[in-house]
Image (spheres, helix red, strand yellow):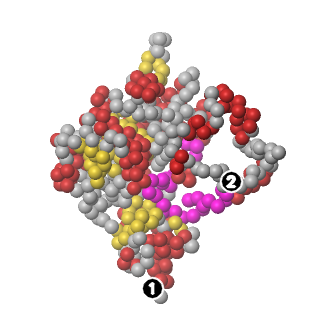
Amino acid sequence: MTQPFVHPYIPNSDPAVRAEMLAAVGASSVEEFYADVPPELRVQGSLDLPPALVAEQDLERHLTSLLDRNRSTRERLSFLGAGTYNHHVPAVVDEVISRSEFLTAYAGEPYEDHGRFQALFEYESLMAELLNMDVVTVPTYDGFQASGTALSMAHRITGRGRVLVASDVTPDQLSKVTDYVRTSLELVPVATVDGTADVAAVRAALDDDVAAVWVQTPSFTGALEPALPALADAAHAAGALLVVTTDPIMLGAVAAPADAGADIVCGDIQSLGVHQWFGGGHGGFLAVHDDPRLVMELPSRLFGLASTDVPGEYGFGDVAYERTSFALREEGKEWVGTAAALWGIAAAVYLSLMGPRGMAELGETVLARTAYAAARLGRLPGVAVTDTAVHFRELLLDVAGTGRTAAELRDAARARDIEPGVVVGEHRLLVCVTEVTAQDDIDRLVTTLAEILQESAA
């Protein structure tokens, strides 16, 4: 008789353990848990897994060999962006968030540890000052979810079913948000002109079924949107909201969207003291004015300062808890789960270290280096920046005139230990620079691409 295989790292592969678990929940087989999943969507048969490594040292060696295939931005000159950015993270940020009282910051729990409540309150306060908004939530899962939530809020507030997408939104974000709101909202793209919003076209598309005008600034191509005030006026005149997705890293040098009339501002905090973590390390923010119509539609937790029963003592706790899914359960507007509280604490440490002057200097540095990169790359033979907008951190190159595809240029640069950017089309390359990208790094990229083009022409 063949003995059942018990995997050394999967306890419920033991038949006795599995039977005990099934009995505890009143199920006769694991298949009952998947009854709602159509059979054609299920994996048929067993997964194609390698044999189990029984000895711990063998497993460690195997996993190390897999991890060693990675090349980080510390080892290779990188101009990659498109949503995850190589900004400097001060050492003290890692030190603080590694403390045991913060490292498992599960939405601020446990309740008896109010130190995390205060840390997240400080995060909200610092973000509110940077964004020039009154109310900021604890972090959501990521900036993509924050954008989807912001548009869902606009739908609930206005009762309308369409959103005008007025800028070049990051494709991955557009895909995720579309999936997030598809049961209640239709996203209607309005073509941009020279990299920024076509205000006249947005005005023409506005009607009494538009819940919001959605703008991403900087856009996918790094273009800053100069027409936010005009877009806000047009949206408000039609009874719609202006929702702006932005990156707070730039707001020391660029006016906050709230100053231009934005109703809801959202985005990702990865650039504020959070490492790239191979594509992870994201947390979303939502910010609104102190307007009950807006505040009560926020599904995420808010921590506020409150007096206690002891005169002169204060504590930190939930604000308007009754609007969250924690209180409403299945009747909640949106589900709020684990979220990304630890990254909020990281952002708080980062912002407290930088201060207003530091954020201003950082924003000005990135703007200057982006302009320098655009000027130098745009002078390469056959290479052109795709628009004349002011750019922050990223710019899109058209390389059609070189006779080479963007993928060919990328591969040739990789062979020289440089990641030149993200390929976004046959002849389009998205290049990213940050404050850690030195002028010499940009010059090296330009020189390398020039050599590649000369070799191909020879």
Q: Main structural element of the magenta stretch: helix, strand or loop? A: loop
The x and y percentages for residue 309 are 47, 11
- Location of residue 30 with respect to 50 vertically, above or below: above
The three-letter code of the residue at mark 1 reads Ala
Up/down of 146 relative to 368, above or below: above
Disc number placed over residue 457 in the picture, else none:
1
What residue did someone put label 2 on?
A: 49
On screen, residue 277 versus residue 296, left or right, reads right
The quarter holding residue 256 reads top left
Between 152 and 449, the one nearer to me in the picture? 152
Q: Residue furthest bottom?
A: 458
Q: Position of residue 392 (x, y in %)?
A: 37, 57
Q: Earlier in the sequence, mark 2 or mark 1?
A: 2
Picture residue at 70% right of the left edge, 38% below the top: 12
- Most foreground residue, 224 or 8: 8
Residue type beneath disc 2: Leu
Residue 93 is one of the magenta-drawn residues: yes
Residue drawn at the location 58% of the way across and 36% of the way down: 32
Which residue occupies the foreground of this view, 48 or 207?
48
Could you classify mark 2 by the number of other residues whose Cα lies within 10 Å: few (under 14), some (14-19), or many (20 or more)?
A: few
**158 with respect to 351 (left or right):** left
Judge from the rendering whether residue 162 lies leftward or rightward of residue 68; answer left or right: left
Please, is residue 404 above or below residue 245 in the view?
below
In this rendering, the label closer to the viewer, 2 or 1: 2
Is there any visible trace of residue 259 in the rendered image? Answer: no
In this view, the residue in front, 145 or 49, is 49
Report the magenta residues as a range.
66-94
In the rendered image, residue 266 lying in the magenta stretch gets the answer: no
The answer to whether mark 2 and mark 1 are in CB contact below 8 A is no
x and y, in percent, of residue 55 in the image: 80, 49
